[in-house]
Image (cartoon, helix red, strand yellow):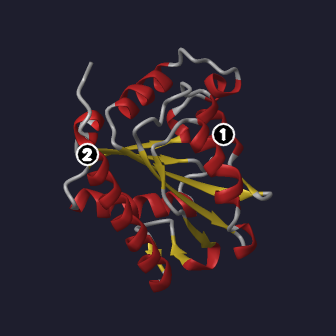
Amino acid sequence: MRVITLAGSPRFPSRSSALLAYARERLSALNIEVYHWHLHNFEPQDLLYARFDSPALQTFIEQLKTAEGIVVATPVYKASFSGALKTVLDLLPERALEGKVVLPVATGGTIAHMLAVDYALKPVLSALKAQEILHGVFADDSQILDYQHKPVLTPNLQNRLDSALETFWQALHRCDVPAPDFHRAQGIAHV
């Protein structure tokens, strides 16, 4: 099983990338293969000029095709998610997240930015046809005690992130099970 993590902060290290580092560690412990992507993997000119043929973008899209899920992390700026992350998402094919489980996570200066995930990020993820967008995790800056080294989170944030990752893991396994044939389940003969 494969998952992609996408860090949407233009800074590294950052609080939102610390949440992804924590998530990668937890998912790897569950024998999930994790590919990590950061905005710095993309050439700024490729993003600025919308180069759909960018080698990094093409590699990202190929890895995304083989992944069952994606964890997207972003800082919240001015009541919305990172503009650079929006640019990457805009360059993806229309159905890039089809069949994928998505866990959004975000950080911001105050709890007042919490709704940015629901009102700004989730609609974009939905437009990319994500199969399931889970309830996100928002952390204000005070809940991330260290992001420069190994992430240190408050116990409350760690518990919320663990719970979200467990839900993500369960959703990945739900999606991994082949769906029964609709007609057979309904007792309808194929024509």
Q: Amino acid at mark 1?
A: Lys
Q: Which of the two residues, 38 or 86, is positioned nearer the viewer here?
A: 86
**Residue, disc 2:** 176
Q: Which of the two residues, 93 or 186, is positioned nearer the viewer here?
A: 186
Q: Is residue 153 above or below residue 84?
A: below
**Residue, disc 1:** 86
Q: CA distance from mark 1 to mark 2?
A: 28 Å
Name the residue at the top extreme.
Answer: 53
Residue 24 position by quadrant: bottom left
Q: Which of the two residues, 100 or 86, is positioned nearer the viewer here?
A: 100
Quarter of the image with the N terminus in it: top left
Name the residue at the bottom extreme.
Answer: 155
Q: Are marks 1 and 2 in contact (CB under 8 Å)?
A: no
Residue 89 position by quadrant: top right
- Residue 172: x, y in percent? 31, 52
Residue drawn at the location 54% of the way across and 31% of the way down: 42
- In the rendering, which numbered label is found on residue 38? none
Residue 61 visible: yes
- Residue 27: x, y in percent? 29, 58
Name the residue at the right extreme.
Answer: 78
Disc 1 secondary structure class: helix
Q: Residues within 10 Å of mark 2 (few under 14, many from 20)?
A: few
Q: Amino acid at mark 2?
A: Asp
- Residue 158: x, y in percent? 43, 77
- Discs 1/2, front: 2
Residue drawn at the location 36% of the way across and 31% of the way down: 63
Quarter of the image with the C terminus in it: top left
